[in-house]
Image (cartoon, helix red, strand yellow):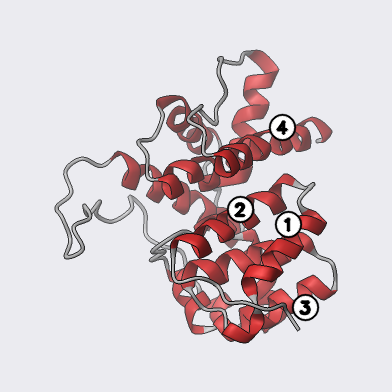
Amino acid sequence: MKQLSGAIHDLASEVVSVLRDGDHRSVAGAGAVRGDEAVLRVAAARALGADVLLPTTLLRRPPEEPVLALVREAMRTYPPGPDASAATVWSHWAMERTVLRLTSTDGVPDRGGRRSTGAPPTAQPDVSDLESAPWQRLTHQLAVLGALAVPEADSAVAEVARRRSLDVSRGFVRAVRRRDWFQAAGAGRWLAAVRGAPETLGLDTGLDFVLHMGGADPRVALHTHAARWMCATGPGCGEGAPS
């Protein structure tokens, strides 16, 4: 278990490095890995889910085959079982959807000039539990599902986050006060993705604070860098500080 935690830490750190620096090296590393290291890397990719491909999603550059191969192997090796949690099923769906979107070549342009990639190969899981969850649990669950918080997110989870953006904002403030940096980063990422933060929240400053305090954890840094990128490339996330 400790080895897997280390592998997740290392892979998340690589994603953060690419997001932070905008370099063009592969997240999957310069050289192929073998043996136990390869097994751990696949398991780590399954844990991070679609975020392994986040640099391609955010930086709008062609996906690199080693990264795609890693994600495909993670999906093949760790499909959700019949008793899998909703978070696991959603994570797998997001991986499938992201790979399909990044590799499709036969879509047709939409009204915005983008190419449609069609529906994902499996149906979206149910979100009724999220819709009815108290705002504290909603924030926790959205942080776990942070990999779905991407630009132009069109999943059912994103629709819940949009409709309940004030609850997510409350959750962000609560997480900051409780020094739960992972949950704060995940909530902030969702607010940036769905443009749901009220101006009085001061999400820009709040994200900087979360990164400063919790950024040693690469999972926190990953969510925070993703959120800051979406803030910087969109209409912004407001000024001020969380109250």
Q: Nearer the viewer, mark 4 or mark 3?
A: 3
Residue 236: x %, y % from top left: 50, 70
- Marks 1 and 3 in Cβ contact (< 8 Å): no
Q: Is residue 23 above or below residue 201?
A: above
- Marks 1 and 2 in Cβ contact (< 8 Å): yes
Local SS, label 3: helix
* Residue found at x 47% / y 72%: 194
- Mark earlier in primary sequence (4, 1): 4
Local SS, label 2: helix
- Mark earlier in primary sequence (4, 3): 4
Q: How far apart are marks 4 and 1 (CA)?
A: 21 Å
Quarter assignment of residue 170: bottom right
* Residue found at x 48% / y 34%: 76
Q: Distance between the residues labelled 1 and 2?
A: 8 Å
Q: What amino acid is labelled 1 in the image?
A: Leu
- Marks 4 and 3 in Cβ contact (< 8 Å): no
